[in-house]
Amino acid sequence: MKIYTPPPDKAITHRALMLAAVADGNTRVCGPSLCEDTLATAACLKKLGVSISASKNRLLVKGLGLGGLKKPRGPLNAGASGTTMRLLAGLLAGQDFDSTITGKGSLLKRPAARVAAPLVLMGAKIRMRGDRAPIHLSGSSLKGINHKLAVPSAQVKSAILLAGLYAAGPTSITERFQTRDHTERLLKHLNARISAAGLNIYLKPGRLKAKDICVPGDISSAAPFIAAACLLKGFKLTVKNVGLNPGRTGLIRILKAMGAKISVSRTHCAPEPAGNITVSSSPLNGIRIRPDEVPAMVDELPLLALSAARASGTTVINGIGELKHKESDRLRATLTLFKSLGLMAKADKDSLVIKGPQTIAGGRAVDTFNDHRIAMTAAVGALLASKPVKIRNPGCVKKSYPAFFKDFNKIFPRQ
Ligand code: S3P
């Protein structure tokens, strides 16, 4: 059996840094993710006057309190990080200074109105380039809103909650489908007056109290290892200390329902559930996936599609509309990857149908569309392919997991 420890969770690290920045007191973020995206968040916060220093495996954030952020000199650069841009928009909407959030590459092509619209309802003054960044925010006072989330997006939900800290009066949010609740958990951890029941979240504005935050391993980074261990004959893998937020573990639930041998032992990494996952390879069967199951594996859909191609029978994934708004048009990127690997899938606007089992022929170069999740899925495809596969632009994994290929080749060495 092989043992693998994934890198720390990116989504939790972004939130830990932002919330610690506006808490009262100092927070130690223990075991933070240090990838391009989270470093972009740290750099933006530093430009807002926040002191963040590294020691051993920790980041020490000196909280400035809710009213302590400083007007930045020049635009804040979110890089290619959607979470940085959208959550910062929420954090900055209710400040008494103006700011601009910009980015690079795919981020400048991704929709921004989905986050701006609810913030404007709260009273934010926002200018953009149509539906695109840069996002210009003018200092404004906010009011709480009762909001029904139009898209199942944890980033948009989190932006509203961050803005809600600064609003006059409470904010409530109703989700159509449950998305990851890292922000809600962290807010509670830092003494915010927040309650959540099912699809409803209720937040009263107010100050946060600093408290150490532990970051577990990133389940999305571990996902290619888990999928590969399921699919590779005779393999057994234990993934150590990985985050098990129910809003992120959709792939595990679905693979198990497809017949995968996966067992989980639980620990805790305050304020998140965590644990060890043991995966043994086993034959998989096709499955039908409902739209409400998708948000909990939104970043793992390309991997699920690949797993479905190796499963017996038909898999139908419904509710895939959000895929086109990721670092690439991930539906197109997945279909192109399938074609290059010699696989077949059929898609319409909202569903993907894959009939298996199919053989992964390989033998051709594959495109990553500069999308880290596609590069990681391609690595699993290459591992299972009959002929060698060249992955173009593998360096795009730096966005979330700089050491991905080193770790992957160590756990799954080439014969
Ligand atoms: C994220 C939420 C998801 C996910 C992204 C990170 C987050 O995006 O795809 O990689 O940190 O909240 P949406 O909220 O837009 O679905």
Image: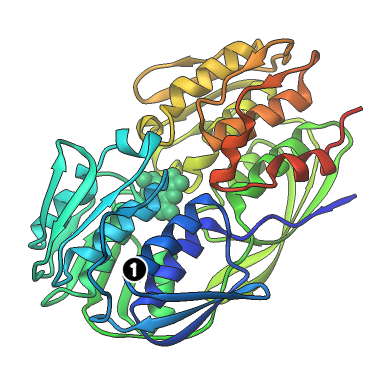
Quarter of the image with the C terminus in it? top right
* Residue 274 percent location from the top left of the image: 63, 66
Q: In the drawing, does residue 20 fall left or right of residue 402?
A: left
The residue shown at (43%, 72%) is 185
Please give the residue where the numbered disc 1 appears in the rendered image: 197
Q: Is residue 271 above or below residue 224?
A: below
Q: Is residue 345 above or below residue 216?
A: above
Q: Amino acid at mark 1?
A: Ala
* Residue 123 percent location from the top left of the image: 7, 62
The residue shown at (77%, 27%) is 383
Q: Mark 1: few, some, or many residues within 10 Å (few <14, many ≥20)?
A: few
Q: In the drawing, does residue 325 fall left or right of residue 408?
A: left
Quarter where residue 337 is shown: top right
Q: Is residue 6 above or below residue 372?
A: below
* Residue 153 percent location from the top left of the image: 34, 48
Q: Residue furthest front?
A: 73
* Residue 21 percent location from the top left of the image: 38, 76
- SS under mark 1: strand
Q: In this view of the protein, which residue sits in the foreground, 350 or 260?
A: 350
Q: Is residue 260 above or below residue 186?
A: above
The residue shown at (65%, 27%) is 378
Would residue 178 be seen by someone viewing this image from the given angle? no
The residue shown at (59%, 17%) is 338
Q: In this view of the protein, which residue sits in the foreground, 18 or 217?
A: 18
Quarter where residue 131 is shown: top left
Would residue 120 be seen by someone viewing this image from the given angle? yes
